Amino acid sequence: MKLSIYKIFIMSMLGTALLQACLKGELDTPPTGGNDPQIPADQIISLQEIMSKFYTPGKYTNFDIDKHIKCVVVADDKSGNFYKSIIIEDENSDLGISLLIDENEIHSSYPTGRRVYVKLKGLTISDYNGLPQLGMGVDNSGSSPRLGQIPPALMSQIIIPGSYNIPVAPRKKKITELGPSDLNTLIQIENVQFVNVGVNKKYANNQLDPPLTINQDLVDCSGNRVIVRNSGYADFANELLPEKNGTMTAVYSIFGSNKQLFIRDTKDVAFDKDRCGSGASLFSVKDLRARFTGAALPVVSGFVQGVVISDIANKNINGQNLVIQDGDAGIVLRFKSAINIPLGSEIKVNIGGGELNEFNKVLQVQNLENTNVEVLQSSKSITPKVLTVAQIDPLIHESTLIKINNATLINGSKYSDKIRVKDATGEIDLFTSSSATFTSNTIKSGTVSLTAIVSEFNAVKQLSLRNPNDIE
């Protein structure tokens, strides 16, 4: 039987891949030394020249040059925080790039500290949301094109191994100094700490199926922040975040406009100093409410996080206010000027410099800077708690979303009238601001289900609609 050249090629590549797989178990502990291949100097090109001549964000550029880049592996996939990729830094320009390989356990052949020569001919350079990458071809298997990975069978032909134990020294940087030339390089930041620490605050979550990757905020002592992104598949995912301050070594990355850091393992996190004051804690809304004892309380530092349950678009709320809910607790946030954050946005707010106090018996954090809001994601919903009128207790339900079934609207025909909500257990005021977009709308008749925010006005409990769709 005759075999086509194509079939012979495929069988040869599969044989190479199987041989590599058999060798992997023996290479978990890399030997010392190693030999660098004899590649002529005129075949070596710097990554800086590659980036200036061939790299355009958003485009896929194939290489047809018989050149190599001489690099050192600065991060591998051993801990699981890097997936099917290694990070390499160019020895001729100090720039770095992410090398995509369709293989697991890459570190058994190309561990951190090993010199590699990457043959460019046949490879493709592009980016992933702004992060430069090297791979092979274009992968159209998903909903949108992305850079293809180097097949395992071609790995040893493209990535030529050299010496082991090449020193890998991070460059010292400040959060504010991180820029394009630092992408895919190993950097070190001093005097930093995690914002959100404490009981059950972990790098990621490997208890779910699939495991959950989590962004943790890192802050310096001047309040500058950067994301530390941790894979749920990392072997340190279930470890608690260190509570102290110290030095972090990491690979600098980017996703769109978001700066990110990826640690290789927890040895990169040396936090052994006392925390600085600007690295404020993240309060739950429930804990924040519990701090109020009846008198105005300045908030020196801290963050609060929750989902916006008020609807600024329909204006049934003061333009300087937002109502957020975190679990079963909610609170009003009042800013120094009008703020436009849509209903359903999950936000994190720096409340340092604000004041915890009541306004007409409604608890709020006031005097907040508009620039202290970070939108984490949009279109997140809160499920309202189903209650009767008699069950509504402002001490428990204030500034949270509730739902009343089998109710009627009485006392008028329009929302601008003093409408009340009535069910079999009692009645409660329905507040509608004069500035609400629906104030002149005719109310719905008959039996309705009503979703609203629980509020108060001088100790008189009331409900506030977000928009007309809250009445079914």
Image (cartoon, grey):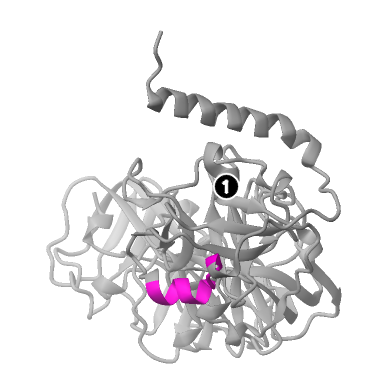
Q: Is residue 343 magenta-colored?
A: no
Left or right of 344? Residue 444 is left
Q: How many marks?
A: 1
Quadrant of image for the N terminus = top left
Which of 103 and 172 lies nearest the eye of the viewer? 103
Q: Residue at x 58, y 37 (%)?
A: 209
The correct choice, above or below, for 400 with respect to 32 in the image is below
Q: Residue at x 84, y 56 (%)?
A: 33
Left or right of 28? Residue 394 is left
Q: Position of residue 22 (x, y in %)?
A: 71, 29
Q: Position of residue 351 (x, y in %)?
A: 58, 82
The correct choice, above or below, for 356 with respect to 461 in the image is below
Instruction: Identify the secondary structure beneath mark 1.
Output: loop
Give the residues in magenta.
Answer: 43-53
Q: Is residue 52 magenta-colored?
A: yes
Q: How dense is the environment of label 1, judged by Cα within 10 Å: few (below 14), some, or many (20 and up)?
A: some
Q: Is residue 328 visible?
A: no
Q: Is residue 302 visible?
A: yes
Left or right of 217? Residue 378 is left
Say which amino acid is labelled 1. Answer: Lys
Which of 300 and 267 lies nearest the eye of the viewer? 267
Q: Position of residue 230 (x, y in %)?
A: 63, 57
Residue position marked by numbered label 1 in the rendering: 84
Q: Residue at x 51, y 83 (%)?
A: 372
Which of 424 and 123 lies nearest the eye of the viewer? 123
